[in-house]
Image (tube, helix red, strand yellow):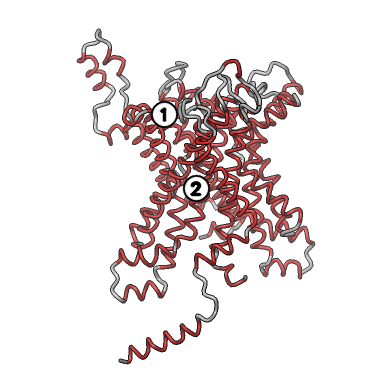
Amino acid sequence: MSKYLLRRILILIPVLAGISVVLFTILAMAPGDPFEELATNPNVPPEVRMNLRAKFGLDDPLPLRYVRWMVSMLRGDWGFSFVSRVDVDTLIVQRLPATLAVLGSALVLAILIAIPIGTYSALRPYSIFDQIATTLAFIGFSLPTFFTGLLFILLFSIHLDWLPFIYRADISSTGWRWWWEHLRQAIMPVAVLGLFQAASMTRFMRAAVLDVIRLDYVNTARAKGLSESVTLIKHVVRNALIPVVTLVALQIPGIFGGAIVTEQIFRVPGIGSLLIASILANDTPVVMAVTFIFSILVLASNLVADLLYAWLDPRISYR
Amino acid sequence: MAARIASGTVIGKLNVASTAPRTSLWRETGRRFRRHRLAMIGSVILLALLLAVLVGPLVWRVPINDIDFKAKLKGPSWSHPLGTDDLGQDVLARMLYGGRISLAVGIAAMLIAISIGTAIGATSGFLGGAVDHTLMRITDMFLSLPGLPLLLLIVYLFRDTLRKMFGPEAGIFILIVAVIGGLRWMPVARLVRAQFLSLREKEFVESARSLGAPPLRQVVRHILPNSMGPVIVAGTIDVAAAIIAESTLSFLGLGFPPDIPTWGRILYDAKDNLDFAPHWAIFPGTAIFLTVLSINYIGDGLRDALDPRKVLGK
């Protein structure tokens, strides 16, 4: 098992290197000069600008600049924000927990919805329940997150006035009250993201259970007298989850996209809204760092998917 | 002589066989597609939307930037069927015009994604070996790129240059279409590669090869047309995904400028007035939703219609 994990981590290194090359190439190809202001300022002689460029190594060959950039990224030296004058890593450490909390709860919600409904649909294909579930799933993944978010605000905040539509990080109350306020403001962002993921996950789950349910080992499990629930949970669902994990892992980059949108709509103080704010404020170091963090998060979730495979199907880790 | 006799008997046999009703592959596919009720409803809705967007501005001749502060933020009425926005501009006229851009982005980005994906998948699957290995590693790497953050990063870094080069509208259109297409080709590449790996060993390709067909002809005339089924399905879904990607960008305020009211852009402008002008957000949002939903159903219908395993069953 640990050997398998090590192998998966080693595979990620070239992927991470590839992603960093792509990011650096985009940055290097981009027009614009960090010393543009100096160039238009008549009080600064061109030699000073040239010396500054040389000092920061901007005229060095690209591969050298890439290596220097990568080394400082790896050492945790991510520069500082032009706008808030804080180190980029401090900013990200402040913002990351909110993003992870919303994403994690949304994923849990999606799993809690998708696995039972998908399984039940597949057990009675083309029944009324299945048809309703399938239709809802189609609607669910055709509704873009930004529109669902607005509809939720319209319904639950404006029309019914049940939930706050602005996420506040600084809630003054304490104890149970504090938890309650946090829960209330997290409901809508988590629901928007979770339902969107649940929609496609239900479809995957239904298809996977349909494939598994007629296999011989399910009949064997029934024939040897296992109860229906044990057969379902230990034999059908567990095996059906393997392709579902693959498909969900492929969707992870899209899920992070949805997270950016929901954070922006509900003003959740996470790294997604940080990204948008920095783009609007031309804060390049923060933009680069957040994009890099998103890449790392995608790779980390792929690693989690690999671990799940090994747990669902132990044969995989022996290969 | 012997060959002539042999071919004569083959023709004779074919004639016997052709007394059964002849169906071409595409006619058969069309027949099965028409049986898929929801896909047909989807096609009708999509066609209606397309028609509205193409012909609508010619019929509904209200200008999209006609500012009228007396009529601002009004709900639907006879003079403004879908209401007005905060400047008193007609939402219907803006949606009809913006819909053209939204749909054009979707289709153009899909074409780019399919072209890149088919080229890479075909190269990879036909050549095999080290080329295949390298290309598939690159595909895997692209699959783990975070789509939206990267899209935002590229738009952020390049939009000013392209705006200067091609003008504000064309520049941002080219940028958005190229980046969305350039980040969505990977599934197509994998599909095409898988098709090529199985098709290139099939008898009909082998016979083309033994007749001396050069590799390019084998690919273009024999393998590629037979591997298009899954690509068509993926392409359909890609249109929907590209429309959502563009709307998301515009919704975040980083897509098209306000004078090009794509559906996402209208939503972005509308979202701060949700409490007193909900119609302003609901109509463009519904347009996006209906378009994406019908495209998804069409994709589902095409998948069923093109699935060769279902031919024998029905």
How crowded pointer 2 is (Cα within 10 Å; few <14, some 14-19, many 20+) is rated as many
Looking at the rendered structure, whether the residues under marks 1 and 2 are on a common chain is answered as yes
Q: Quadrant of residue A166?
A: top right
Circle 1/circle 2 CB separation < 8 Å? no
Depth order, front residue of B91/A22? B91
| Gap in angstroms between the C-alphas marked 1 and 2 | 23 Å
Say what secondary structure mark 1 lies in: helix
Residue to which mark 1 is pinned = B156
Q: Is residue A275 above or below residue B127?
A: above
Depth order, front residue of B59/A137? B59
Identified at 57% across, 64% down, the residue is: B31
On-image quarter of the C terminus of chain B: bottom right
Q: Position of residue B266 (x, y in %)?
A: 55, 29
The nearer-to-camera label among 1 and 2 is: 2
Identified at 60% across, 26% down, the residue is: A268
| Label disc, if present, on residue B5 of the rendered structure | none
Tell me which chain the residue with mark 1 is part of. Answer: B
Q: Quadrant of residue B267?
A: top right
Residue to which mark 2 is pinned = B238
Depth order, front residue of B287/B216? B287
Q: Position of residue B308 (x, y in %)?
A: 54, 67
Tell me which chain the residue with mark 2 is part of. Answer: B
Residue B216: in sight, yes or no?
yes
* Number of dots carrying numbers: 2
On-image quarter of the N terminus of chain B: bottom left
Amino acid type at mark 2: Asp
Q: Position of residue A278 (x, y in %)?
A: 47, 23
Q: Position of residue A97 (x, y in %)?
A: 59, 29
N-term mark: 1 or 2? 1
- Furthest residue in direction top, as rendered: A43
